[in-house]
Structures are given as C-alpha cells and as structure tokens.
Image (tube, rainbow, N blue to C red):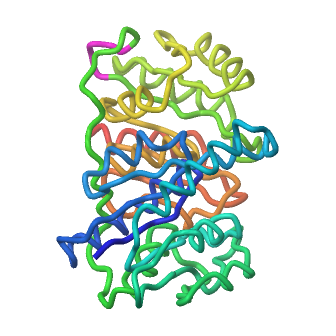
Amino acid sequence: MKILIVRVSSLGDVVHNMPMVADIRRHFPDAQIDWVVEEAYTSLVRLNPHIRNIIPIALRRWRKTLFSDATRTEMAAFWRRLRAESYDIVFDTQGLMKTSVVMRMARLVPGGHRVGLANATEGSGYEPLSRIFHDQSIKVGLHTHAVMRARLVAADALGYRPEGPADFALGSPEPQRLPWMPARPYVVFFHGTARAAKQWPQAGWAMLGRALSERGLPVLLPWGGEKELQAAQTLACQIPGAEVLPALPLMEAVALVQQAHLVVGLDTGLTHIAAAYCKPTVEIYCDSPRWKTEGNWSPRIINLGDDGAPPGGEEVLAAVDRLLA
C-alpha cells in the first residue's frame, strides 16, 4: 500500500503529525509512506525512518515571486515529482485549501481515496471548503489534541483504533559536538515566540535561570529573530554562566534539544520537538489552550499554565526540581 501525507507546516504541526505514521506502520508494516512538507522542514521529516520519500514544497517562498520564471520552473518540477507515483490513500491532515489542492493534484490508483478532516477543532485554522477535494472526510471532536487528530484520521480511514502513547519515531541527527555545546549537562530555554501574548515574563526566566545556575547547570539561550536575540542578551546578563547561542539551522537546534539535560520552553515548535524526544521538558502555556498541544505521552513532560493563565515562577521551578530529581 502506498500512502501520501500532505502536512506542509508549521514546525510544531509537522512534529505532531508523526505518531500517525508510526500507527500506520504498526498496522501495515509494508506500507510505503511519502510526505509533502515545506522545504524548511524536510531535514526533520527525514529523521523519521518510516518515511520513504519526502516531497519538498515551497509555498511560503513561491507566493512572494509567483509569476517569476524561476518559481514557475520549480512549481512544474514539484508537480512532476508529486505525480511520479500513484497512491492508494492521500491524507490531508491540515484542512486548508492550499493543502487540499495539493492532495487533489496527487495521482491515485484505481479505487484510491483522498482523506481529510470533516470539521475544525476549536481555534484551528481549518477551512471548510477543503472538503470538496476529499473522497472521505473524518469527523473529530471539538477538543481533540493535535496529535490524536491526525492519528484518528488515519485510523478511521484504514480501519484500526489508535492505541498506546504517541510514538514520534524520531531518529537522531548526525552525531556532532558543536563548538558552542558545553561538555557538561546543560539546560535550554526556548523563551521566544512569534506572538508576544504567548511569552512568559522575563523576570520568571531570570529567576529560573539563577536557580539552575546555583545547581551547576548552565543555561543556553537560542533565539529566532532580532527581538528574541535582544531578549536573550538581556537574560544572559541576569543569569550567571548563561550563554546566548549563535543562529542555529534546524538540525543544530534539534541536536541542541536532543542532548539537553532539561528543556524549558513556551508553546513553540522546538519545545514540542523536545517533548517528542521525551526529554525532561517543562512546557509553559500563557496564551494558547493547553489541551491542543500539551505533551501528554510521557511523565518526563510537565505542562503548566493555560490560555490566559500563565504559571507563576515558583510553580515552574517546582516542576523543574521534580524533573531534575
């Protein structure tokens, strides 16, 4: 059986889609599974040994130069690669017009199916018109976790029940000792997000960092833009021994996570990668519903706060102490 998954972005959503793949392979060990994903995330999907082929798409880049010759050439090459195989089932687990159009472009074997979501979950960006491109639309509950949503779509279409904790099946990046990586155990703070309302107060990060420094654990501060860099530099001045990292490509960021002793982070893609690896992780929710993405598959993950109810500093420190113990 040949299966194509269309889940193009964002980073956290791509991560949360991976247990669906492990479920399929558990019930259909010989299934050949391909994945259409944004070009920026191909290296992450490549860490999943259950994926046969990755088909990169560059929607984010193409829309900026839609009518240029170079973009049209790239789009034609994507079309040819997408159409090179015929699939028994094509899954769109994102539920957007752009992803359902990609689903429709894929070739099916005789009797094949295109399967997608029948409805939104609360607060999702689901676009109801996407259903016109499905042969089969799967209904999910209004408050279905992002991981379970994808698992339920695959299970319903293929005739099994999703059982057991989520298995992300993420392999390790290429082994490497990067110049900025400490030789001793370290803690990572994913302190920045694209949306200001999701941020946790700097005073909380500083207090937590000083407590970890007193325990002999250096704090590493990655960043993802000029504002996050400035915030990291400000924090580093308040936390003894803290280090502001250089700009990291995705696989170096994954290596940073995988080798960390502890990760504390906001509701962001890299925090969700730490949870997917079942690293000791504290996930902090300030302005997004915890039920949507919380790491609920391992006791090594502690989720704090909720939409409009960020946790206090002492609560986060207590969670850190529990994981370090």
Asked if residue 20 is positioned above or below residue 44 in the image, the reply reads below
Q: Is residue 278 visible?
A: no
Corner quadrant of residue 185: top left
Q: Is residue 56 above or below residue 121?
A: above
Tell me where residue 60 sits by quadrant: top right
Residue at position x 31%, y 51% in the image: 48
Residue at left 53%, top 90%?
Answer: 136
- Residue 90 in the magenta stretch? The answer is no
Closest to the observer, 21 or 115: 115
For the C terminus, give its image quadrant.
top left
User: Who is closer to the viewer here, 180 or 128?
Assistant: 128
Horizontal side of 222 relative to 167 (left or right) equals right
Q: Would residue 184 be counted in the magenta stretch?
A: yes
Image coords of residue 49 (percent x, y): 25, 52
Residue 131 in the image, given as x and y percentages of width and height: 66, 84
Point out residue 15 in the picture as x, y percentages from the top left corner. Answer: 45, 54
Question: Is the stretch drawn in magenta largely helix, strand or loop?
Answer: loop
Give the number of marks. Answer: 0
Q: Is residue 310 above or below residue 206?
A: below
Above/below status of 288 relative to 277 = below
Query: In the rendered image, which quarter is residue 187 located in?
Result: top left
- Whether residue 15 is visible here, answered yes or no, is yes
Magenta span of residues: 181-185
Q: Nearer the viewer, residue 315 or 226?
A: 226
Residue beneath the point at 28% across and 16% down: 177
Q: Nearer the viewer, residue 207 or 42?
A: 42
Residue found at the far left of this picture: 29
Q: Quadrant of the N terminus?
A: bottom left
Q: Residue at x 55, y 68 (%)?
A: 291
